[in-house]
Image (spheres, rainbow, N blue to C red):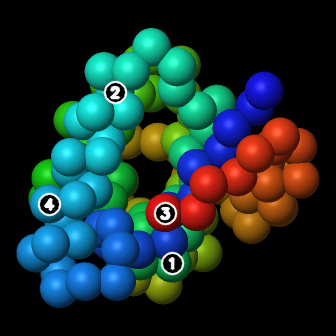
């Protein structure tokens, strides 16, 4: 089963920013240590900030990528926020790639 995670926020949940950051750090660190991992993690909107310089989770995302998880990041969003040069992990792609990944997934989990 191909599972895709969808991250659209610079953290997890609808909470104060500090709590969102704590939750995403905990979630991704635990996910990186799990045997079963998603096939892809998609980032768009504010979620693209997680793959950029200064993000607390770049190391965990790198570990997931090294374990075979594809990290696809919305290039339109990166351009909007002026972050193209600050990407530290993942592959910038367009919305067509994100759409294709969502359509081909057996299960999509939105975080």
The reply to whether callout 1 and callout 3 are in contact (CB within 8 Å) is no
Give the distance between the C-alpha atoms of the residues marked 3 and 2, in whole angstroms: 16 Å
Q: What x and y, as percent, mark residue 48?
A: 43, 65
Indicate which disc residue 22 carries: 4
Q: Nearer the viewer, residue 50 or 92?
A: 50
Residue 93 visible in image: yes
Residue 72 is left or right of residue 35, and the answer is right
Distance between the Cα atoms at labels 1 and 4? Answer: 19 Å
Mark 1 and mark 3 lie on one chain; the one further toward the N terminus is 1
Secondary element type, mark 3:
loop
Q: Name the foreground residue: 70 vs 111.
A: 111
Marks 1 and 4, the one that precedes in the sequence? 4
- Quadrant including the N terminus: top right
Which residue is the site of mark 3? 111
Proximity of marks 2 and 4: CB atoms separated by less than 8 Å: no
Q: CA distance from mark 2 to mark 4?
A: 16 Å
Residue 49 visible to the viewer: no
Which callout, 3 or 2, points at the residue further toward the start of the chain?
2
Q: CA distance from mark 1 to mark 3?
A: 13 Å
Q: Quadrant of residue 33?
A: top left
Residue at 45% from the left image edge and 14% from the top image edge = 35
Residue 32 — which label?
Answer: 2
Q: Which residue is mark 1?
A: 45
Mark found first going from the N terminus, 2 or 4? 4
Which of pointers 4 and 3 lies earlier in the amino acid sequence? 4
Q: Kindly report which numbered mark, 1 or 4, lies closer to the viewer in this rendering.
A: 4
The secondary element bearing badge 1 is classed as helix
Label 1 vs label 2: CA separation?
23 Å
């Amino acid at each position: 089963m191909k599972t895709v995670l969808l991250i659209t926020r610079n953290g997890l949940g609808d909470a104060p920013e500090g709590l969102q950051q704590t939750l995403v750090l905990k979630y991704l660190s635990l996910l990186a240590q799990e045997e079963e991992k998603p096939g892809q993690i998609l980032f768009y909107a504010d979620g693209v900030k997680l793959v950029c310089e200064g993000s607390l989770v770049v190391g965990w995302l790198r570990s997931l990528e090294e374990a075979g998880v594809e990290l696809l990041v919305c290039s339109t969003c990166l351009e909007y926020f002026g972050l193209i040069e600050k990407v530290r992990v993942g592959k910038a792609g367009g919305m067509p790639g994100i759409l294709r990944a969502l359509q081909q997934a057996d299960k999509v989990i939105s975080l």
